[in-house]
Structures are given as structure tokens and as C-alpha cells.
Image (spheres, rainbow, N blue to C red):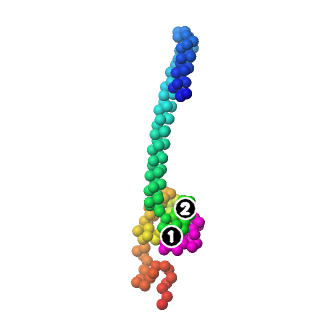
């Protein structure tokens, strides 16, 4: 039985008592029943609204999951699928359990956001683009490599090319 049905039932019981409406007590009871009826209608409207918003939120959640899959898809199958901190294959990254036998060409770097101090993993291509948005606070992290003198013989791996 819904709230509005319960209020209607109580109203019917009160009317069946054939109370003297000139008495103050009966006026108070009628006013309380009117109030309860208004509240029951408001609650029913809110329940409908919450149900609708819940359905819309589920749709947004599904769309977001699809979008995350497309944007953050793994470069290889070496990472644990349950890792929700990043999609990295870097053996030095402590944020997920990556397979040590990863033979992909992916290189990932840990970057700490200066605003929220969240550590995220980014790939080399993202670093070369020059910026990435922190997933925690939304801050744009910029990377500037214009100061580096890489020379023509540099392979950019830090090995200081030996002849």
C-alpha cells in the first residue's frame, strides 16, 4: 500500500466516525490529514524523480565506462585488468601488479601532480604531446622539453651513447 493509499484509508476511517466538525480537536485532525496527504504526494513525486535520475545516472555511468575503455585502453595485456590507478607496464611503477615478462615497447613514467600530489602514470607519447589532465583534480600538467639538448646521436634513453 502506498502512502497516498494509506492516507486515503485513514481519511475514510475518520469520516466513518462521523465526528462533530465544529469541535477544535476534529479541525486539528482534519488539518493533520490534509498535511499528511500533501506530504504523501510530495514523497511520491520525489520517489519518481529519484527513480528517473537513477536511470539517467546508470546510463551516464555506462557511457563513461565505454569512454574510459576507449581512452585508457591497455597497450598490452600484461597489466592486471582490475588495476584502476593507471594502465602502466613500467616495472618500477608500484601502483599495479604488472607482469615482469612484458615485452611491449611501452614506456611509462610516474608524474606527481603539484596541486593534489596524486601520482599518475603517463606514457612517452603523452609526455611528448606536452600536457595531460590530472584525473584526480583536473589540473593541466604541462611538460616542456625545449631546454634539453638531445643532440643528433641521442637515443633519448639516458645511456649517453657510447662509441
Which quadrant would residue 149 be assigned to in this image? bottom left
Q: Which sits earlier in the primary sequence, circle 2 or circle 1?
A: 2
Point 49% across, 79% down: residue: 157
Start-end of magenta stretch: 88-112
**Residue depicted at 43% across the width and 65% down the height:** 131
Crowd class of label 2 (few under 14; some 14 to 19; many from 20; radius 10 Å): few
The magenta stretch spans residue 107: yes
Point out which mark residue 108 bears: 1
Q: Position of residue 123 (x, y in %)?
A: 47, 69
**Mark count:** 2
Query: Tag 1's secondary structure?
Result: strand
- Residue sitting at x 44%, y 61%: 71
For residue 81, the mark is: 2
> Is residue 163 magenta-colored?
no
Marks 2/1: CA–CA distance? 17 Å
Image coords of residue 17 (percent x, y): 57, 12
Image coordinates for residue 2, horizontal then vertical, percent: 53, 28
Amino acid at each position: 500500500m502506498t502512502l497516498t493509499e494509506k492516507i486515503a484509508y485513514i481519511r475514510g476511517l475518520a469520516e466513518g466516525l462521523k465526528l462533530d466538525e465544529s469541535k477544535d480537536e476534529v479541525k486539528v485532525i482534519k488539518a493533520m490529514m490534509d498535511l499528511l496527504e500533501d506530504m504523501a504526494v510530495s514523497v511520491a513525486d520525489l520517489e519518481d524523480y529519484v527513480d528517473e535520475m537513477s536511470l539517467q545516472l546508470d546510463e551516464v555511468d555506462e557511457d563513461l565506462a565505454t569512454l574510459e575503455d576507449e581512452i585508457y585502453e591497455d597497450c598490452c595485456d600484461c597489466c592486471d585488468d582490475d588495476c584502476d590507478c593507471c594502465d602502466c607496464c613500467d616495472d618500477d611503477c608500484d601502483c599495479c601488479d604488472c607482469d615482469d615478462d612484458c615485452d611491449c615497447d611501452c614506456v611509462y613514467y610516474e608524474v606527481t601532480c603539484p596541486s593534489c600530489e596524486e601520482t599518475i602514470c603517463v606514457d612517452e607519447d603523452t609526455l611528448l604531446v606536452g600536457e595531460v589532465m590530472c584525473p584526480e583534480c583536473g589540473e593541466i600538467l604541462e611538460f616542456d622539453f625545449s631546454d634539453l639538448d638531445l643532440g643528433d646521436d641521442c637515443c633519448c634513453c639516458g645511456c649517453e651513447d657510447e662509441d
